[in-house]
Each structure stands twice: as structure tokens, then as C-alpha cells.
Image (cartoon, rainbow, N blue to C red):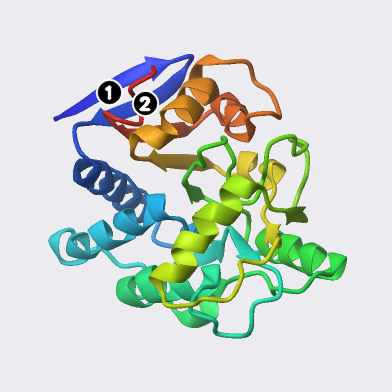
Amino acid sequence: MIKNHEINGVNVIIADTPKEVDEEAAFLVSGSVLHNSRSVLGLAAGSSTAGVFKAIIPFLEKYRLSFSCCKAFAMDEYIGLPELCPASCGDRIMKSFIIPVGIQPSNFYSPSPRDEEAVCVEYEEKIKKAGGIDLFILGLGVNGHVGFNEPLTDFDRGVHIAELSAATLEAGKQKFEAVGYHDNVPHKGITVGLRNIMKSRSILVVAKGHAKSSAIASSLLGKITTSIPASILRLHPNVTFVLDKDSAADL
């Protein structure tokens, strides 16, 4: 069952199960692309969005949906990973979303995993040249981080290199192990900043599981503070949270 709520001016959709979350989020993404076939998408590579990407596939035929004219930007990338590393954010998005939905690989952009300020400037310019992001599809970390925008990240930061928190490193370790990559998780990453996300024309936040419930409650009900990076999202005029009952338990 799907229920719609408005919490502090934010559209919040609560589903009974993680599967329903994925399907509802996929439906919203599909509707956005049907409305604008040349959409520019921002994509997070975490566990929250993986199910959404998979749930979009049946809609391709059902709604005669085409992503062929879309462009997409990866949210973030680990610094120092080798090219085509299966644990990289870019490679996981390419395999789980870009190729299955038919986005041209030349229209998919992922930040270079180099610890250089020039990479940040270059990626920011690519987003600007594409006309900005139409829809950013995000997950949310247990500490309220968004992408590699860790707690205490300035809300006005653009693309930047970030030191990763213990919570992000632990989540990264699980992702690395899932693809059979056993090297240590890099302690730095390059990420699209909160300023870039807030400039997107629409934002979709997906969260599942009780481990996310505290961060969700803080983001939607607490103070807007850099201690909870996701809290700034509720100031966006077109943001939707899609949650399961467990992640919404503290609302």
C-alpha cells in the first residue's frame, strides 16, 4: 500500500515494502522522462537506488519509454580506483542502469577518480554545459549524508573532494565485497555538492530499512543543519521522499 503525506512542505510517499518503494520511485522517474525525453539525470550509485534502477526496466516496454536521448551524471566516485574497476560508482551505474535503459554511453558522465581540484572544476562545467540536472535520484546515508557530502559539509559547496566518514567507508566496504573487490575502500571521494543538487529542477530521495529511520526523521523533522546534510533538501521546491515503513518509523 502507498500513502502520500506532506511533512514540513515536503511530499513524502510511504510504502509497505522495499519492493513497493523501488516500483513507486521507478514510476516517478519514468513519468519524468516521458514528460521530457531529453532529461538530464543525476544518479547516486548506492544500495538505495539499485532497486529503483532495476524496477525501471519493465516500464520501458509497458510505457514505450525511451532513455535514448537522456544524459546522466554520476553523483560521486572514489578517489584512486583503477579504470573500469567493478567497485567504482561509474562502473556500477553503467552496468545497472545506463546500458539496460539504453542511454548512450557517450551521454553518461562520471568524475575522474583523481585527487585534483581541476577534476572538480571540469565536472562542474560538464553539468553546467548540459543545462543542469532535471532530476536527481538520491539515496541517504545512516548519518544523513548525501553522496559523499558528509556531515558538516557546507551547503554552498559545489563539486569537491571529500574525506569519507566511517559510516560511508563501512557502506563502501559492503559494496566492494558484493562485486568481489577486496582492496581497501579509498578514504577520499569526489562528489557533486549540495549546491549542485539544490539547483536541480527536481529531486527524488529513496530510503529503505530501519537503519535509515533516524536520519530520515532528522532530515524531515529536525533543524536544517550541516550536521544532517540531507536536511537542506526540504528547502527545495520540488523534492519527493519515497520511503518504506521501516525507514519512516520515526516520523
Q: In the rendered structure, which disc, 1 or 2, sits on the residue that comes first in sequence?
A: 1
Disc assigned to residue 166? none
User: Which residue is located at x 45 percent, y 64 percent?
Assistant: 175
Check the image and report above or below for 171 versus 243.
below
How far apart are labels 1 and 2 at the CA level? 6 Å
Q: In the figure, 237 relative to 205: above or below?
A: above
| Image quadrant assignment for residue 1 | top left
Q: Residue 4: which numbered mark, if any? A: 1
Up-down: is 108 above or below 224?
Answer: below
Q: Position of residue 42 (x, y in %)?
A: 53, 56
Left-right relation of 89 to 190: left
Image point (69%, 74%), residue name:
112
Give the image quarter of residue 240. top left
Task: Quickly name the residue at label 2.
Answer: 12
Residue 75 position, x and y percent, is 58, 58
Question: SS class of the residue under badge 2?
Answer: strand
